[in-house]
Image: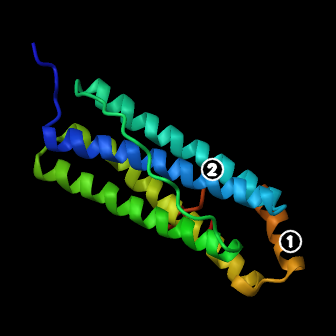
Amino acid sequence: MDTNRLSDTLAKALNQQMTNEAHNAQIYLAYAAWASSKGYDGIANFMFRHSSEERNHMMKFLEYILKRGATVTVAEIPHPGPNPSNVNDCFEKVFQSEVENTKSIYDIVNLSLEEKDWATWNFMQWFVKEQTEEETMALDLLSKIKIAGGAAAKDDALYALDNDMGKTPDDATLAQDTSVQNP
């Protein structure tokens, strides 16, 4: 008896997203190693934590595919690309990676809507919110490096930024979670 409740198209898209999440984990891991090698231990710690978070996202997709009775396809993870040239470049690359991931998430949401696969649509809503947090976090990083001087940031500003990054929480405050009392 066939217990698969995912279309071939959705199963393929979910498997691809699982690989995307693994790729994002590798990107954060590579940037963490790069930051650590440059002496930016606070930035490295932040990036290591986000690498772990991306691996957790990968596992959510893997479990969902299995629980829907479809086949998980573990594919090769693309190379994370070249190391950043500086902290500003690192944060720009993080932002770009998150934007690309958001587009992929939205494609799956649209596909599940078209197919009227409400279980997958519902599952993906967690990722829609998560990507809003991830993009907000990446924009916050870009704002911090801009204040520090961007690509031309001086060592004292980068030292302060690195210290701040070691204490930066993993979650960003979203617009929908703010109020007049809690801006």
Q: Earlier in the sequence, mark 1 or mark 2?
A: 2
Quadrant location of the N terminus in the rendered image? top left
Residue located beneath label 2 in the image: 29
Per the image, the residue denoted by label 1 is 160
Task: Give me the residue at 37% from left, 37% from top.
Answer: 61
The image position of residue 165, as x and y in percent, is 76, 62
Name the colour scheme. rainbow
Considering the image in quadrants, where does the C terminus appear?
bottom right
Image quadrant assignment for residue 157: bottom right
**Rendered residue at 87%/70% (across/down):** 159
Q: Give the amino acid type for the residue marked by disc 2 in the picture.
A: Leu
Choose between 29 and 65: the one closer to the eye: 29
Q: Select label 1 or label 2 by which is in front.
A: 2
Residue 122 vs residue 38: left or right? left
Give the SS element for disc 1.
helix
Q: Residue 162 versus residue 123: which sits nearer the camera?
A: 162
**Residue 84 x/y as whole percent:** 64, 69
